[in-house]
């Protein structure tokens, strides 16, 4: 009878442990959600800004200059500036601190221009052919208060990046890596906007 009792107690102990773990995750989830709400309200209360307009980015990449990666000219990706603009809009929507609006109704306007696209070799194979690259997108950006036309901040050569392999298990195309770099750029721009205050 003794051993059976101990087995029952052990089972009860495990059940209590599982309940404790579940309760911990429940509390963590509530804290996370509460934190998200606090961040949004704190941002609006501190700045007074609730809406933003993303001005379509301008492409000022010089595709005729010489390139040092074995190509004669820099690669041109059609409508890359539109992809950057759309990625930033999507990221602001995901972030939720500032709502996207029309220019006339926006508290602030984000302006930007795409100025450079660079591909650098990170690693070569044994026969000296590149097997890993890093892609970097460079932009000039500024945030302007609509009412006063005051420039709140501006950055020259602001960058987003991604790396990719040309061979092996993690092989990726340059276009896929460029999409990743665009997403990284958008994330950094939104974080800079929200955390500037």
Image (tube, rainbow, N blue to C red):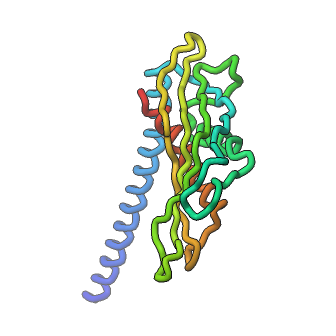
The residue drawn where x is 69% and y is 21% is 103
Left or right of residue 26: residue 80 = right
Dividing the image into 4 quarters, which one contains the C terminus?
top left
The residue drawn where x is 38% and y is 56% is 24
Q: Position of residue 125 (x, y in %)?
A: 48, 78
Which image quadrant is residue 91 in?
A: top right
63 and 125: which one is in front?
Answer: 63
Q: How many marks?
A: 0
Is residue 90 placed above or below 6 in the rendered structure? above
Q: Position of residue 181 (x, y in %)?
A: 57, 53
Is residue 142 placed above or below 192 in the rendered structure? above
Which image quadrant is residue 88 in?
A: top right
Q: Position of residue 36 (x, y in %)?
A: 48, 39
Is residue 99 placed above or below 125 in the rendered structure? above
15 and 133: which one is in front?
Answer: 133
The residue drawn where x is 63% and y is 53% is 74
């Amino acid at each position: 009878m003794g051993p059976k009792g101990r087995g029952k107690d052990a089972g009860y102990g495990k059940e209590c442990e599982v309940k404790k773990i579940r309760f911990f995750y429940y509390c963590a989830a509530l804290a996370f959600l509460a934190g998200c709400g606090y961040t949004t309200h704190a941002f609006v209360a501190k700045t007074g800004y609730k809406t933003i307009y993303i001005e379509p980015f301008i492409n000022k990449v010089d595709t005729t200059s010489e390139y040092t990666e074995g190509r004669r000219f820099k690669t041109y990706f059609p409508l890359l500036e539109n992809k950057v603009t759309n990625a930033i809009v999507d990221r602001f929507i995901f972030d939720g601190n500032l709502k996207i609006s029309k220019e006339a109704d926006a508290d602030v306007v984000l302006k930007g221009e795409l100025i450079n696209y660079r591909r650098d070799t990170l690693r070569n194979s044994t026969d000296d052919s590149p097997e890993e690259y890093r892609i970097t997108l460079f932009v000039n950006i500024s945030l302007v208060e609509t009412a006063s036309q005051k420039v709140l901040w501006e950055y020259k050569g602001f960058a987003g990046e991604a790396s990719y392999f040309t061979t092996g298990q993690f092989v990726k195309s340059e276009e896929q890596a460029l999409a990743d770099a665009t997403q990284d750029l958008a994330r950094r721009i939104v974080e800079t906007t929200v955390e500037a205050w």
